[in-house]
Amino acid sequence: MSTKWFASSRGSRWLGMLGGAVMTATLGAQEPGGSLEHRVTEAVSSVVRARVGAAAKVEVTVVRTRLTQPEAAEAGLVAEPPPGARLGRPVRFALFRAEELATGGRRRRVGYVMAEARVEIPHVRAARALSRGQTIGAGDVEVSNTDVGQVPMAPLPRLDTALGLTVARNVRAGELLSSSVVRVTPLVRTGESVVTRVAVGALRVTGVAVARQRGQLGEVIKLVNKESGRRLRGRVVGKGEVEVVP
């Protein structure tokens, strides 16, 4: 299936989002043309990079796509994976209109895509077998840039963040060290002010909220906008930083 795609370039704008906070955002130009499968693939690739890191090399295989509003693809699509989604296996991503999310409008699902995303990104693996409770030292890990396999769609510990952490269970040599394998120090603590980020294609919006829960890398926690009292949910992506999720 192929349709023509018409999209205009938009420059900087001031948006009131995330409970009324005002932030600067820039939406880059979208290239016209391309098949529906191409646009869906780009939507999946974009959300995967937002979850695991901008440096990720993402390969997407589309299994099946269904749009209840085919015209929605003409203005751009945003893909959203379900909670607990993993890389390296088919996942059903919900599809939304990019423009509605960019302007803070009502989120209306316009279809779904069943797709598998495989990722290559620098990460750390165990250089030798590690025992539960062991503190990770420089000789215990090695950096790899291969396919990460079937791991949660979330940021992976880097070499600089892995050293000094404690292994949560026995780990075999060569195993990837994800946040579920090591005990990670919380990057967000209850009551702290955190930077909130929203990524919709080329659009980037930032704000501030208060954490109602502590959270480690990749965990989804509850937040509240201090000014409006609006409740939010965000995935921890760095120290004091969260990515707002539906």
Image (spheres, helix red, strand yellow):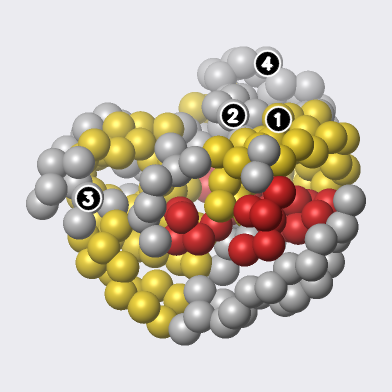
Q: Is residue 2 visible?
A: yes
Q: Nearer the viewer, residue 158 or 33?
A: 33
Q: Which label lies toward us, 4 or 2? A: 2
Q: Would you call the spot at circle 4 few (<14 residues within 10 Å), some (14-19), or many (20 or more)?
A: some
Calculate the distance from the C-alpha at mark 3 to the C-alpha at mark 4: 44 Å
Q: Earlier in the sequence, mark 3 or mark 2?
A: 3
The residue identified by callout 1 is: 92
1 and 2 marks in contact (CB < 8 Å): yes
Q: Nearer the viewer, residue 149 or 137?
A: 149
Q: Quadrant of the C terminus?
A: top left
Residue 82, numbered circle:
2
Calculate the distance from the C-alpha at mark 1 to the C-alpha at mark 4: 32 Å
Q: Secondary structure at mark 4?
A: loop
Q: Secondary structure at mark 2?
A: loop
The residue identified by callout 3 is: 19
Q: Residue at x 80, y 29 (%)?
A: 90
Residue type of the residue flagged with mark 2:
Pro
